[in-house]
Image (cartoon, grey):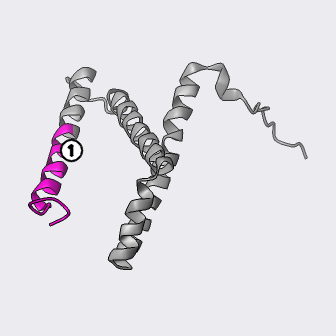
Amino acid sequence: MRRPWRPAQRWNWWQHNPAYRRYLLREATALPLFVYALVLVSGLYRYTQGQLAFTRWLEAMQSPGWLAFHALAAAACVLHAITWIELVPKLLVVPGISGPTIKRGHQVAALIGSAVIVGAALASWPLGGAGS
C-alpha cells in the first residue's frame, strides 16, 4: 500500500509572504488578550476574597511590569480591532453596497457600542470617584 503524499512544510513558511506575516501578527494579538482576560478574572476572584485582597491586587496591577503589560494588551486590542474591521468588506459581500460603506458602518457601530459601554460605566460610577 502506498503512503499518501505529504508536501514538506518548512518551519519559516510565513516569512516568505508579507500577507502571511500580517496574518500571524493579527492572530498573535489574541495571546496578550487571553492573558489579560485571565488577569481580570483573577481580579474578580480577589474581589470575592474581600477588600484587603482586592486592594493588594490593585496595587500589584500598578507595578511597572503590569503597566507595561496593560499597554501591550491595549495595543494588541487596537491592532486586532483595526485588522478585523479592515477584513469586513472582504468577508461580508452585500450586492449593491460598496466595501468602504460596509467598513464605515462597522466603524460607526464600534464607536456607538464603545460609547454605550463607557456611558453605562460612567453612569454607574459613584459620585465623587472610588474613594467615596
Query: Residue 126 at what x, y percent from top left?
Result: 12, 63
Residue 1 shown left or right of residue 36 in the figure:
right
User: Residue 99: horizontal and vertical position, in percent?
Assistant: 27, 22
Residue extending furthest bottom?
49
Q: Quadrant of residue 110?
A: top left
Decide whether the magenta segment is chiefly helix, strand or loop.
helix
* Residue located at (38% from left, 79% from top): 49
Residue count near mark 1 (Cα–Cα under 10 Å), binned few <14, some 14–19, many ≥20: few
Q: What residue type is labelled 1?
A: Ser
Q: Where is residue 88 in the image (x, y as percent from the top left)?
A: 33, 32
**Does 44 sit above or below residue 122?**
below
Q: Closest to the observer: 5 or 127?
A: 127
Residue 51: image location, x then y, percent:
32, 75
37 or 106: nearer the viewer: 37
Q: Would you identify the image quadrant in which residue 114 lies?
A: top left
Which region of the structure is painted magenta? 111-132
Is residue 73 part of the magenta span, yes or no? no
Q: Name the residue under label 1.
A: 114
Q: Say which of 95 and 108 sits in front.
A: 108
